[in-house]
Image (spheres, grey):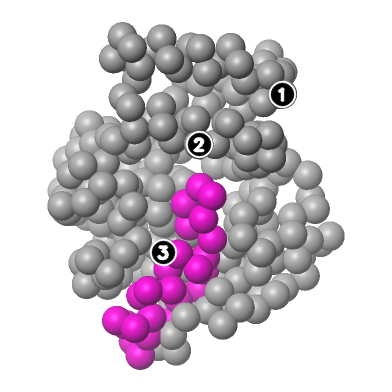
Amino acid sequence: MIRYSDYKKSVIAIHVFGNGDTTVVCLHGYGESGESFAFLEKYAGNNFTFIAPDLPFHGLTKWNEGNSFTLADLTSILSSFIPLSLKKISVAGYSMGGRLAFYWMQEQPGQFRSAVLLAPDGLHKSFWYNFSTQSKKGKRLFRFTMSNPQWLFGLIKIATGFRLLNKSVAKFAHHYLKNPAERELLYSRWTTFSNFKIDRIKLGKSIKKQKLKTTLITGRFDRIITSPFIISFSESDKKNITRIVVEDGHQLLNDKQAQIIISQL
């Protein structure tokens, strides 16, 4: 089921799966939508209600608030569907959605009963992402590159040739840079979600203070989100954080992983 909610000047699409008593907010990955979590309904729809919004510049959501999105925006949107002030919820975040979930946990850990992060972004501080979205010079270069990407294609080719960039990441970059419309979306999406900045120390303290059950699920063959930072973060609090490695790549929202995901919610 898809519901639509007016928010400021925008229209937000929210997918709702299942009718169980336990509420799970699902935050999707880059270029995807809330529909990515639909497969969970057939496995646990009687026990859980999955609330999966299409994030700005994704899916069926019509975002008209410029290139800015905050945690206050996210919680305000969800509050029209979930009484956030009255109950604890679970959160499931995949890839980019994992970064948003981490930030929410970092700032409002008392909101949650459990968290499942699948191939989560955010624990690794990317120089280029921070430069492109946090500094004036970086934003100008980013804007220029999205209009004139040729120099970046050349740099990617050289970096791949010298094995400074793995082929999976290079393929991922080409997919989203070769098309002008996709480049415009990339610019809007990166800048819009730049407010969700992860402070690993603060995040770790928030999880520990609330004794928040946190599960990190990673694919053994994932070449997009690599494991060193996830491993070190999980080992910093073995009492509250569990790391599970599955025989899969970066795309973990599939039937093979359904039972593992559900068991951790």
Residue drawn 58% across and 12% down? Answer: 151
Is there a contact, CB below 8 Å, between mark 2 and mark 3?
A: no
Element carrying mark 1: helix
Name the disc covering residue 20, or none. none
- The segment highlighted magenta reads 28-52
Name which residue type carries label 3.
Val
On whether residue 252 falls in the magenta region, the answer is no
- The residue closer to the viewer here, 198 or 142, is 142
Dot 2 or dot 1: first in sequence order is 1
* Position of 255 relative to 33 (above/below): below
Instruction: Farthest residue to the right: give it.
Output: 9
Q: Residues within 10 Å of mark 2 (few under 14, many from 20)?
A: few
The location of residue 196, given as percent across then percent down, is 55, 42
- The residue closer to the viewer here, 78 or 45, is 45
Whether residue 102 is visible = no
Element carrying mark 3: strand
Name which residue type carries label 1.
Ser
> How many numbered callouts?
3
* Residue 143 figure quarter: top right
> Which residue position is annotated with label 3?
91
> Which residue position is annotated with label 1?
147
Name which residue type carries label 2.
His
> Which residue position is annotated with label 2?
175
Dot 2 or dot 3: first in sequence order is 3
Q: Could you give the CA–CA distance between mark 1 and mark 3, rounded to whole angstroms?
A: 36 Å
